[in-house]
Amino acid sequence: MFLLLFLCTFTALAQAQTLTSPDKNFVMKFELTAKGEPTYQLTYKKKPVLKQSKLGLATQDVPSFLEGFTITDTKQATVNNTWEPILGEQKTIRNHYNELLVTLAQPDQKGRHIRVRFRLFNDGLGFRYEFPEQPELSYFIIEEEHTEFNMTGDHKIFWIRGDYDTNEYAYTTSQISDIPALIDKATHDVHAQFPIDTLSVQTPSMMKTADGLYINIHEAALIDYPAMHLNVDPKNFKFSSHLTPDAVGNKGYIQTEAHTPWRTIVVSDKATDILESRLILNLNEPTKYEDVSWIKPVKYIGVWWEYFVAGKSTWAYGTETNVKLSDDFTKLTPNNRHGANTENVKSRIDFAAKHGFDAVLVEGWNIGWEDWFGNWKENVFDFVTPYPDFDAKELQQYAADKGVKIMMHHETSGAATNYERRLHEAFQFMQDHGYNSVKTGYVGKIIPRGEHHDGQWMVNHYIYVAETAAKYKIMVNSHEAVRPTGINRTYPNWIAQESARGTEFESMGGLAPDHTTILPFTRLMGGPMDYTPGIFQTDLSYYGTGSNQRVNTTLVKQLAYYVTMYSPLQMAADLPENYERFPDAFQFIKDVALDWDDTWVQEAEPGDYVTIARKAKGKNEWYIGGVTDENSRTATIRFDYLPKGKEYMATIYADGKDASWDKNPQKYEIRKVRVNAKSVLKQYLAPGGGVAVSVKEAGKQDLKGLKKL
Amino acid sequence: MFLLLFLCTFTALAQAQTLTSPDKNFVMKFELTAKGEPTYQLTYKKKPVLKQSKLGLATQDVPSFLEGFTITDTKQATVNNTWEPILGEQKTIRNHYNELLVTLAQPDQKGRHIRVRFRLFNDGLGFRYEFPEQPELSYFIIEEEHTEFNMTGDHKIFWIRGDYDTNEYAYTTSQISDIPALIDKATHDVHAQFPIDTLSVQTPSMMKTADGLYINIHEAALIDYPAMHLNVDPKNFKFSSHLTPDAVGNKGYIQTEAHTPWRTIVVSDKATDILESRLILNLNEPTKYEDVSWIKPVKYIGVWWEYFVAGKSTWAYGTETNVKLSDDFTKLTPNNRHGANTENVKSRIDFAAKHGFDAVLVEGWNIGWEDWFGNWKENVFDFVTPYPDFDAKELQQYAADKGVKIMMHHETSGAATNYERRLHEAFQFMQDHGYNSVKTGYVGKIIPRGEHHDGQWMVNHYIYVAETAAKYKIMVNSHEAVRPTGINRTYPNWIAQESARGTEFESMGGLAPDHTTILPFTRLMGGPMDYTPGIFQTDLSYYGTGSNQRVNTTLVKQLAYYVTMYSPLQMAADLPENYERFPDAFQFIKDVALDWDDTWVQEAEPGDYVTIARKAKGKNEWYIGGVTDENSRTATIRFDYLPKGKEYMATIYADGKDASWDKNPQKYEIRKVRVNAKSVLKQYLAPGGGVAVSVKEAGKQDLKGLKKL
């Protein structure tokens, strides 16, 4: 596509370079300071986005890459092509950028050189450090990466606290300068957390400037490197990279030829552009898998939500509180509330088959749950031994007869070494029993002890699991792993992740009504989320267990999530009986696609609302979802993406007039109308509510009976 | 055998208990202090060996096990039986002890209780802590074990510095009180060392009292627990346990039911008794392997010593100094000195076949050696990809045709996680290619980073490797692993270990002439050592590489090692051409047995000399080895273990009259004589020299021609 040649001379070139985006809206200026420190700055439509910001890395064992640089070579290039994701929000993704590759040498270090590669797209900037193989540089250890993001003012920011072990915090919306005052309150209790002791926030980090610019900072292609958090300088509105350390405090082991992940800054004056950005995916490598035919969307139900709400079933089988894998689990005292028993799973399989779901997730099927959490214990699970009341062979046959897959569950309790040791046997068990997808979990402090969920070793672990799973044609849905950075492009069987505060927290204090208007701008910028939506019974006191918890949405908002919270793997998380109580609303979950030809973000404002329309892949079907925060609003939904001159049947799932997330969440109205490309729907969304629309082809006769929108 | 019942009442029992050894020589007294601290003391033939010494553990998460105890139950029992090791120094081992099991409760901790189990043999004491499963105690983390060994005076001690990562120090002989002055000098440069920053020494720790008592402190059955070092109080002559921490400073994760390894104190007024002690093996569990028929002694040569001395060959294949497993190694620039090439290995196989060796060790056969060391790098080796000039298939056939095995080499460079990840594939490769033994190596800082060679995680790793190897019927010879504690009884395919300063150091500064008179009293107390003896060409300047190094022994002392340094796996480490120069001396190496019906330690003094006679297993052959330090001496070798009334042919390999380790190491004399049970050989050993004797049945005719000894 383009050929880059590097001249490793020490001729001083112009010490400043500019790069322009294809549409000319962005200009990036790279410049060395008088001390030879690399810097960059970014403007969008002539407005400054990032003031001059330093680049560099402090190292151990070798002199640092911070200053004393001269530019010894620069190369510019343009790429404009398209590619097709295996599964995605669009069938075809355009990859259009101008590139500047700067070679920086340190004359005082025998001309040792690094490179910085900038790619400027129409939706923002990506850049990374590259460490060429050279006699002067084979191995080094990173003490800290010192990449700055120097903001122009005290922007509004949607943030969660920097933490090496969890992404499961609730979001705080504030000005940058307010972070210090709010940081303690923002540090919620989460299992196995390790809040960074200096002031920091996580990425993807979403900001909005006073003059209406939207700025998102994250990273792309996080491989063999620790995850990046952002130090916060609340006075100067400056962020700087804060890498996740390993057990001995080091922040990355590098062997040249190597490079860092991309640091990404997605920018627009329209919030919808942020959600439509494919910059992060574009900066990831295409997959090397040869056969991807087995990677398919998964719509699933599970033996799961009942553990949180119904109060009658448990992951564990026994009443004992001290068990070992070497124990004879048939000798345990059954607690008689074990959820993953053969009969219960069969009834879920029946339900899945009846309603066209691909799979049934079964948690708690394997021995070890009696004391799985909190002991920093290595051999909690073996991933191959079912509880006495879970008949793997019988269920294999039963599921196969019904055309349904069982989804495997591998909770590691954070013991990654134990999981790796047993991984082949675990995947072989899956293959032998007809499972083609696994939900992995990392609840707990990591083993290797001292490592963190977000460290380089664990980053490599998750990828090792995904690559190994691919050998067995298994799809992976990871929970509590490091947040995604678009590497589902490279490892498309790593089909979805949790890595954020998901639906489970609705049963533990609840999620703020604006939570899911923020997630698309933060967590989902990195990749698909297994948010596990679809809760119809939002008032959990319903179960009579004494719980006063509630899911803080209307029923319809739960439907909208299947469109607004992109994932090719989606759960219908509620209990079957709740779906049977609302079969007309349930129809939307049954219908909705998981893989898309195209996507149009219609309206969006982080913290307030999101409305998205998508076309099902390979089908003339469209699905639209809209959500709002605690405020009611009227969504404006266009249909201009429909083929012109043709009429379609739209089914509109709307909040009832007096519905609200807290008082009347199950009030909804479903109506069918005719729509065409010129139609516009003005739809009321209740406080904490949403809207869901399906658009399908229909026979003339059917259309005739419908009102025009 | 005996049944123990525990009465968990809080009735205060007598707060002191005594236990006597079967032969009454030892008396152990267990006692609680006024504060309820457990203590023990030990006498031998009425002489104090250990003054009152405290027992206990400091813990995290739960209250410590240090004080506030009452004795709630005691049980005594006697065991007297025998067992047969798979391979060993004796066909039958007697296991005879009196046991005291003390249950200790802490009334202030809801009666939470632990147990201390003492076993008093005729050769010393073993005891361990036991943590019963109970509602009050499921999980805890050890902060430190506080077991004291309170010596009666300023004994002479043969010691190496406490270090979490290496046992490869040279020994220092001093009084206990001199340790502080000598500790820095005793801290030699060793790869990946982590000297403990407080004053400490390693076990097995060998001492001699002023009145001639020999005392050895070590541990037995180190499983799922960190290795123990000894803190030194040089003023009070008190040692206390110092466990190896993990990456976060913790010293052991315990889930009840559990117990610590045994702490062992072997004592006698005869040094020979120390070497004849089987106490440590007796305290290990019998193997659970059902089929052990494939576990056999291994006498081997190798492509190995040439890397240290001959200067012409290397582990690495390429000249490059920065390689990755993903590189195409056929594209490297050959350094033309790669030792593990097909032709070289074939010639070793020829030699092995000609001289009756079981196996040929080949190091450097697999890709990755160009920059394997020092970078704390994870994916250094894959254990399955040969260098371009090593034809695994061709060599498999060649070795099979000659009836010789190739010994696999798995250098992990300390990256245990990488090894575990690839372990099954690596062993499968071995099985597919006809290998039945592997030398493993752990040269380098451990990954998981922050863990140590001697920590609990790594202790479990080595056992995991041994157990997994057993599934493939593979024998393991580990180098740089934690030092052994007799667990070759439980895992008999973990056939030998290095875990001390071995022959390789003769090429890097040399070993002191007394080194191998100390090792049997220290390192070898724990189990067989792959010392790699058999160096005939001791002056390394011989190779013309500019080296002025020398192996600090006579040639004959190298022969003696095959008897004095017990191992069922023994190398003849020197180059084939050196054996061909001294075929008569080489005959002893070819003849000597590796597995024994019985062993008689004839003379021994740590730091001075060791003389051992052994009977080959299942054969009427006896082999005797004797070594001395830098001083010449006359060994007295008895033959009273020979069947009475019968004559045998003894071949005596003796230092020449003017031989010495430093001036004339290759001067030796071989003579054959007639011996019987009444014979006594008074044999001169040169400075740094030795003696080796083989005794065989011979025809009357042959015997007639021999002089009587």
Image (cartoon, coloured by chain):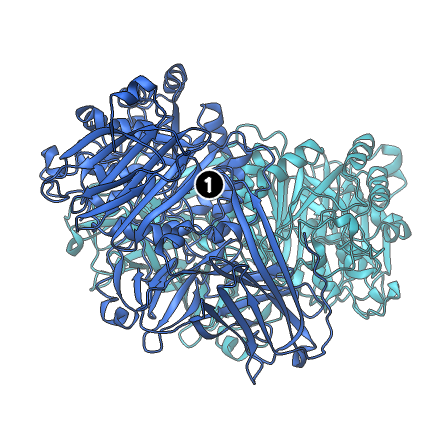
Chain colours: A blue, B cyan
Q: Which of A421 and A440 is in front in this view?
A: A440
In the displayed structure image, the side of residue A281 where residue B444 appears, left or right:
right
Residue A522 placed where, x, y %? 35, 54
In the displayed structure image, the side of residue B11 where residue A101 appears, left or right:
right
Binning the other alpha carbons within 10 Å of mark 1 as few (below 14), some (14 to 19) or many (20 upward) gives many
Q: Residue most toward the front?
A: A645
Quadrant (top left/top right/bottom left/bottom right) for the C terminus of chain A: top left
Q: Which of B190 and A585 is in front in this view?
A: A585
Residue A117 placed where, x, y %? 59, 63
Q: Is residue A203 above or below residue B154?
A: above
Q: In which quarter of the image is residue B642?
A: top right
Using the rendered image of the protein, determine whether residue A129 is visible from the camera's viewpoint: yes
**Residue at the (15%, 48%) spot, across then down:** B10
Residue with the mark numbered 1: A90
Using the rendered image of the protein, determine whether residue B636 is visible from the camera's viewpoint: no
Q: Is residue B54 above or below residue B79?
A: below
In the displayed structure image, the side of residue A683 where residue B49 appears, left or right:
right
Residue B666 placed where, x, y %? 85, 60
At label 1, the amino acid type is Gln
Q: In this view, does A183 lie above or below B495?
A: below
**Residue at the (47%, 69%) spot, across then down:** A42
Residue B343 placed where, x, y %? 86, 44
Q: Mark 1 lies on which chain?
A: A
Give the number of callouts: 1
Q: Nearer the viewer, residue B80 or A123?
A: A123
**What secondary structure is marked by label 1?**
loop
Q: Nearer the viewer, residue B138 or B586?
A: B138
Q: Residue most toward the bottom?
A: A34
In the displayed structure image, the side of residue A432 where residue B570 appears, left or right:
right
